[in-house]
Every structure is written in C-alpha cells, then in structure tokens.
Image (cartoon, rainbow, N blue to C red):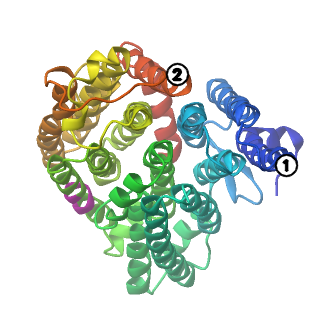
Amino acid sequence: MVTEASTWIALAPAVVLAVLSMVLFLVDSIDPDSDDSTVLAGLSLVGVLVSLTVAGWFLLAGVGQPDGLALLGDQLVVDGTSLFFTLIVTSVTAMVIVSSYDYLIGQPHQGEFYSLVVLAATGMVLMAHANSLITVFISLELSSLSSFALVAFLKRNRGSVEAGLKYFLIGALSSAIFVYGISLVYATTGSMQLDAVAAGVSETENVGVLGFGVLMLVGGFAYKTASVPFHFWAPEAYEGAPTPVSAFISSASKAAGFVVAFRVFIEAFPLDAMAALGIDWVLIFQVLAVLTMILGNFAAAMQENVKRMLAYSSVGHAGYVLIGLAALGGGQDSLVLGAAMMHLFVYGFMNTGAFLFIALAEHWGVGRTFEDYNGLWRRAPVACVAVTVFMFSLAGLPIGGGFLTKYVLFSAAVGAGFWWLAAVGALTSALSLFYYSRLVRAIWIEDPVTEFEMADQPLGLYVGILTAAIVTVALLPGFFPVVDAAQTAAASLLA
C-alpha cells in the first residue's frame, strides 16, 4: 500500500473537495437560519477553483503519466484520465455554484445546497480515480445520494419533490442491478480490482454467469449516463429539479458516469479475452449508442417544453459519447476514445450554459414553452447571443467546440470501420439542428406573445452563462490542447 506524502498529494483535487464539503457544513451550522449565502457561495467557489487549478497543474506536469499512480492498495489511481475528468467536473461545478447564488436568493437551507453540490462533485471526482469495482460503487453512491437530495431541494415545490422521488427510486433500482452485477463478476473472477478481474476473466469457467454480470454492469452505467433504456428518469428529474442542479447532473454527473464506464470495460474486460469467451460487450454498446442517439434526438424534436427538449437532447449526446466504446476494436482505439472524451469536455460547457440560460429565464418569469421565449432578444440581447452559441454548438455547427468534437468523433468511427455509427450520428445531428434552431428562431425572429417584468439582472447567472459561452467559442481556435489532453488520457487507459 502506497502511503508516501508525495504520492498522497497527487490526490489533492479530490481531498480539497471532500474537506470543503465538511467545512461548508460547519460554517452553515454557525447560523443555520441565515438566507444570506455570500460567504457560503464564495467559500465554495474558491475551494472548487483550487481543486480545478491543482488538477490542471498536475495534468500539465504529467503527474501519474503514463502508467498511473496507485493509492490505497490500488483502490484509487491518479493518471491522465482521472485528472482530465476532474477538470470537467470541477469546471461545471464552479459555473453551477456561481449561478446558484442568484437562484437561491430567499431560499432556506442554502448551506446544505452548497455542501451537497461539493459532496456530489467529490463523488464524481472519486469515480474518475476508482480502480476497483468496490470504489466505483462507493463513489457512485456518494454522488447519487447527494444528487437525489439536490433534485428535491425545493421542498415546497411539488415538481421538485416528485422528481427527486422518481430519481431516487430509479437510482435505487439501478444500484441494486449494478451491485448484483459486481457480485457476479466477483464470483467468477475472484476479485474486484480491475487488473485482477482482467486476469480472472481468462481463467474463469463460468462464462454464462460472467456474461450476465457484465450485462448488469452495462445497465448500471446506462442509468448513470442517461442512456437508453435507462434514460426515462432524466427528463422528469431535469424538469423538476432546480435548473442549476439540472445543469450539474446533466453535465458533470454524465461525464463521471462515462469515465467509470471507460475505465471498467477497457481495463477489467479486455476485448480479446472477452471475445475468446464469446462475450462481445462492444456489440452491446453499439446497440445502446444507436438507440440512444435515435430515441434521444427524436424525443427532443417532439417537445414543446424547452427544458424537456434540453433533457432529451442530453440523452442524444450520451449516444454520441457511447461511440467511444462502441467503435473500439477497429484499429483506432486511442483516437475514437479520445474523441469521446473531447466531446464530454466541450459538452460540459455548452450544455451547462444552455441550462443556466433556462435558469435565467425562470428568474425573470418567462414561461416554459418555445413560444414563451418569442422576442426575448429585445430584453436580454447578451444572454440571447450566448444561448445561440450553445444551441448551434450542440447541433454541431462551426460556431463552437461542439463542431470539432463531433467531426473528430465521427471521423474516428469511420476510420475504425464503423461508418454506420458515424452515419447515425450525422443524421441525428442534422435532426438536432431542427429543435435547437426552434429556440433560436423564437428568440430572434418571432414577436413576443406575452409581457413580463425583468426586475433585475442577476450577476451570478450572467457570469456563469458568459463563461460557458466564451469557453465554447474559444475552444474552436484553441482545440489542440484539448486534443492532446484527451488523447493522452485515452492512451493511458489503453496502455
């Protein structure tokens, strides 16, 4: 077991978040009835930015690369992949904390809100570091339990409470499926540590039990990433939750779910060994990717509620990222996996920004349908420019980093011989342009049908939205550092 201080420092981004969540609880306990969250929001933001900065520094310095730095008897690992996804999670968390300051004005229990956000982020970062099935499960539960409470945070709002209850019930079911899958894998391989599971796979005689266990693990990951057929909780939870929380779980939580799926399936279930047993998990992800892209995008196109449209579109984007697993084995594994990671990085900014714009509209009392957004540019031109960037970048137009990530992802799939995955991705992206442009058209072209008062200009929400928009656009010319980081992260998993 590695215990040297110099090695433990490599885990500093996660430790900072864990300590921060406890500090927030203590600070809130001094005056629990206060509805002034300036100190709590400032403390949360500083702590998360420290974690983000340290993770970025470690990534540039090459900490844990290329072989990974093992901790706690190899239960946790620090490598390029874990640091890359820590950057995604902490970036989204910082934007959500800034935006929540305005959203929570007048709300009770603000200390609990910030503590739960940081606690959930801690679980997500630990998911990126997890190197065994037991640490995967513990970190996933830490993230999930905090997220359940955040979705139901508005205790006097029936929609929020109902969404939290549904999210909890589906989460409990998926956890049961996931932990049963872990038990079957342990029964057949004799270990839960990923490299030991890989060694046990080639020696097992219980192929059927192992295959069933792998299938149940796929189900657990499909829930965490809002992939078909475990996607149905997502629109309900996203619609009922406080909108900054919707941004948080649809971006950071999804990225955390994918990094665990990448690490577990690539390291614990090697393609060659599993193929020799007749277990083709790549084929399962190919089916999931196609179904998720098609169902997510068609369902989004049918929505009249803008928030539900974004919820279903996030399901569609999960399908694009699944190509990273579905196109493995075609000779371009590093490229296709790195492309999926790049898309998650850019998606974290453009999707979070889109949800924060919805939060801004809710703050002003704008309705929920596309029609309610008619002519909004006359009242808020800067925010409307930002959401136009988000919508077109999500669709894959060359206005933001989303264009390049989709281009690289689909090109990599074609190069690996899975042209049909790229074709489905391209066709569903074309469909997504239809529903994303509906919001842009309502904002810029249609005449207003209702009047509403814009009492103030919430600074925190504006900062969050503009930060996301600037990064989304800046990633178009500044894409190569992301490419290098993602390719390094992918190579460390495939080594």
Q: Amino acid at mark 1?
A: Leu
Q: Residue at x 54, y 32 (%)?
A: 99
Q: Residue at x 64, y 65 (%)?
A: 138
Nearest the viewer among 405 and 235 is 235
Q: Quadrant of the N terminus?
A: bottom right
Badge 1: how crowded within 10 Å, few (<14), some, or many (20+)? Answer: some
Marks 2/1: CA distance? 28 Å
Q: Amino acid at mark 2?
A: Val
Q: Residue at x 54, y 62 (%)?
A: 148
Residue identifier under label 1: 26
Query: Left or right: where does residue 3 sit relative to residue 333?
Result: right
Q: Are marks 2 and 1 in contact (CB under 8 Å)?
A: no
- x, y (%) of residue 416? 24, 43
Query: Left or right: where does residue 470 sit relative to residue 389?
Result: right
Residue identifier under label 2: 463
Residue 146, placed above or below residue 423: below
* Image quadrant in which you'd find residue 90: top right
- x, y (%) of residue 417? 18, 45
Query: Left or right: where does residue 305 sit relative to residue 224?
Result: left
Nearest the viewer among 451 and 300 is 451
* Image quadrant in which you'd find residue 475: top left
Q: Secondary structure at mark 1?
A: helix
User: How many marks are shown on the rendered structure?
Assistant: 2
Magenta range is: 287-291
